Image (tube, rainbow, N blue to C red):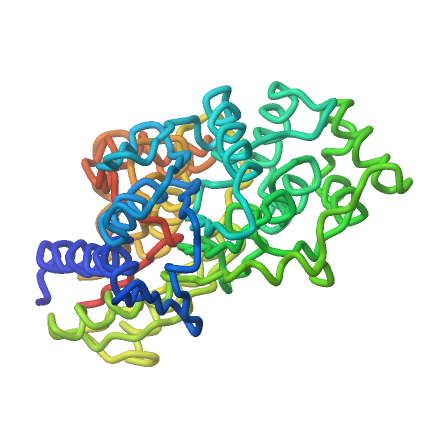
Amino acid sequence: MNTLNSLKENALTIFYAGLEAVCPDILIRKFFLFENNVLKIGDRIYNLGKYKNIYIIGFGKASGFMAATLEELLMGRIKAGIVNVRNGYAAPCKFIKVNAAGHPIPDEAGIKGTLEIVRLTKDVEKNDLVFCLISGGGSALFELPVDGISLDDIQKLTLLLLNCGARIDEVNAIRKHISQVKGGRLVKICKADIISLILSDVVNDTLGDIASGPTSPDASTFMDCKTILMKYDLFRKIPVSIKRHIQNGLNGTAKETPKATDTFFNRVNNIVIGNNRMALEASCKKAIELGYNASILSSSIKGEAREAAREFGAIAREIRRYGDAVKRPACIIAGGETTVGVRGHGMGGRNQELVLSAATEIDGLENTVILSAGTDGIDGNTDAAGAIADGSTVTRAKRIKMNPETYLDDNNSYAFFKGLNDLIITGTTRTNVMDITLLLVG
């Protein structure tokens, strides 16, 4: 229990327990009660016999795996379907089309797939039923800009937003206002009932922020968009076409996104089937099984990764010195999604940057381990989900002439942890419910 190696092994075991709990296949089967053509899902009951056709659409990193489970459960009742997934996230669907596209930067394949989804959605009738499968990554994978804005413009804007340190709700407010399908607009073009099964990758499970809320009303406005762009000094940097569209919105010549008062949202049943809290609870249960005094700190961690790292460092010192918060052997579990204001040229990621910054905070603390990783297996623009560090990480790095501060300044935590063999590489996880951060004190 108290050796450094066992702490690291346990941290990985606890992380993977959280991942397993939010597998889409498990979650859909948990929510999906289907017998004699009657479907009970959430608090509603659907008689599938009254629908002429059933269609499947979806977008997001996990949408293909969600579709594969739905195919099996509905046993040939599906008329047609298409989902947009991230490249490398091929799913074992038999007749639902799986369209692979770029993420986090939208690409031509994503727009082509979105056009197919829109065409299918427009063709459904009032007596049909549409299942919409939504997961994190959907904002990039489900993209169809308004007229006058090109894919190149969208790509430039996306890069600016991803690198400025803006919160996901701020990024998505802008995305929704330059899209034909986000911010509830997908519902507007569909005549049928929609059941949206949603895997949440945002703090507080705010429906309008998950994949930019294609089946949810949008509370943000064009004025919010301009305020956000001014806040991060981006208004003068964004493409002219986007600036013009936002200005048209402010002038009233471009339509606002659909709001909660729009009656067509009565046709939608939005159901969050999985979220970060579920993963944290499973991790906590596993930590207790392994003999730790475990506690969930929060599922709403936000802000700069380095700031969060300082908090975890302070908690570690408090536990070691006073035994406060949780008695040793302790496991503090947290979730959410931090941000990184990119200043350097490295291949970091928010989890790797958090762990590297935390490594400097826990430097010299015996039997203290911190792990942070994305449940989607992707951290920043890297093949790693995150990283793991301990009280000896800084010393080990300096021994091989690696200065943590230099790597932090260049946002190059990926190269740092690769050099120490402390990256966490999961491959495709089939899920996406933000990040899991673990602090273990033996």
Residue 14 percent location from the top left of the image: 19, 61
Evaluate whether residue 313 shows in this view: no
Residue at left 26%, top 45%? 76
Residue at left 23%, top 35%? 94
User: In which image quadrant can residue 160 be found?
Assistant: top right
Q: Nearer the viewer, residue 180 or 127?
A: 127
Q: Nearer the viewer, residue 59 or 303?
A: 59
Residue 123 percent location from the top left of the image: 54, 37
Residue 253 percent location from the top left of the image: 88, 37
Quadrant of image for the N terminus? bottom left
Image height check: is 297 above or below 309? below
Quadrant of image for the C terminus? bottom left
User: In which image quadrant can residue 57 be found?
Assistant: top left
Q: Nearer the viewer, residue 142 or 350?
A: 142
Left or right of 177 on screen, residue 76: left
Residue 306 percent location from the top left of the image: 47, 50
Residue at left 29%, top 79%? 326
Image height check: is 164 above or below 393? above
**Count of numbered tags:** 0
Q: Nearer the viewer, residue 314 or 285?
A: 285
Left or right of 203 on screen, residue 353: left
Evaluate whether residue 400 shows in this view: yes
Left or right of 391 on screen, residue 374: right
Left or right of 192 on screen, residue 424: left
Residue at left 44%, top 55%? 51
